Amino acid sequence: MPLIVMIEDDRLIVEPVARALRGLGYELLPAYDGASGLELVLNKQPDLVILDIMLPEMDGWEVCKAVRQHSVVPILMLTALNEEIDRVLGLELGADDYLSKPFSTRELIARIKALLRRVEFDLQRAPQSQQITVGDFRLDLDRRQVFKGDHELALRYKEFELLSLLVAKAGEVVTRAEIFDKVWGTEWLGDMRTLDVHIRWLREKLEDDPGQPRHIQTVRGVGYRFASGADR
């Protein structure tokens, strides 16, 4: 039974969502402010977090940032704010998807199922005791570790998935469609710009000069390529 924590201060939203999810066999634990919601996530280690932005005690952005310091749990953010900057900020802080209010319970459930299926698929397909080395970079796919030289890089869950795909096909162009299919899944319902945000995060961590990337190259209108030593 998947465990979901919902951090939302409006009980008129929480109660019908809780009934619908419990009716489908999910366990839902509600929290009505950011501080208690963060404590609940860290203590219960749920399978997914539904997180509102406008919360008392701590706003959703603060909660998201704090959760990401300890966990790769999928985070679905709820927002009444329809500005692009708010959606992008959520992605930059580590949210996996967002849903603007007002929303239907049916759409919320569809996004929850898509996120949970994607995590389950990623875990099932994870190869065992396998490493990939390209130039100065070494990926341990079993332990989900990335090294640049002797230095380990701290990557989020999706950052690692994205980098693994690009490095496994080093020197080849990987299309945006293939990346979404293999990293986010064909049922991805979120913003297509999330890929660009994740590429920017990776460049900030991998590149000596993120503004002039040498490793993760953009192939305009097609996708991205991880440059091996021979390609540069």
Image: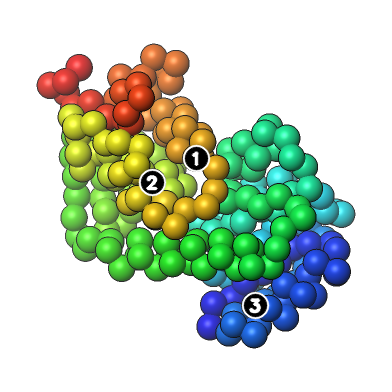
Q: Amino acid at mark 2?
A: Phe
What residue is shown at x 41% (from left), y 28% (from top)? Answer: 203
Farthest residue toward the left?
Answer: 230
Secondary structure category for the residue under label 1:
loop
Q: Do the CB atoms of the residues marked 1 and 2 lie less than 8 Å apart? A: yes
Q: Earlier in the sequence, mark 1 or mark 2?
A: 2
Number of residue marks: 3
Q: Amino acid at mark 1?
A: Met
Residue underneath mark 1: 192
Write down the quadrant of residue 32 in the picture: bottom right
Q: Earlier in the sequence, mark 2 or mark 3?
A: 3
Coordinates of residue 228 in the picture (x, y in percent): 18, 27
Coordinates of residue 47 in the picture (x, y in percent): 54, 69
The vertical placement of 222 against 70, above or below, is above
Q: Earlier in the sequence, mark 3 or mark 1?
A: 3
Secondary structure category for the residue under label 3:
helix
Residue 84 is left or right of residue 203, and the answer is right
What residue is shown at x 77% (from left), y 42% (from top)? Answer: 81
Q: CA distance from mark 1 to mark 2?
A: 9 Å
Q: CA distance from mark 3 to mark 1?
A: 27 Å
Q: Any mark on residue 21, and which?
A: 3
What residue is shown at x 87% (from left), y 54% (from top)? Answer: 56
Coordinates of residue 96 in the picture (x, y in percent): 54, 51
Coordinates of residue 229 in the picture (x, y in percent): 16, 23
What residue is shown at x 52% (from left), y 52% (from top)? Answer: 189
Q: Do the CB atoms of the residues marked 2 and 3 lie less than 8 Å apart? A: no
Q: Amino acid at mark 3?
A: Leu
Residue underneath mark 2: 180
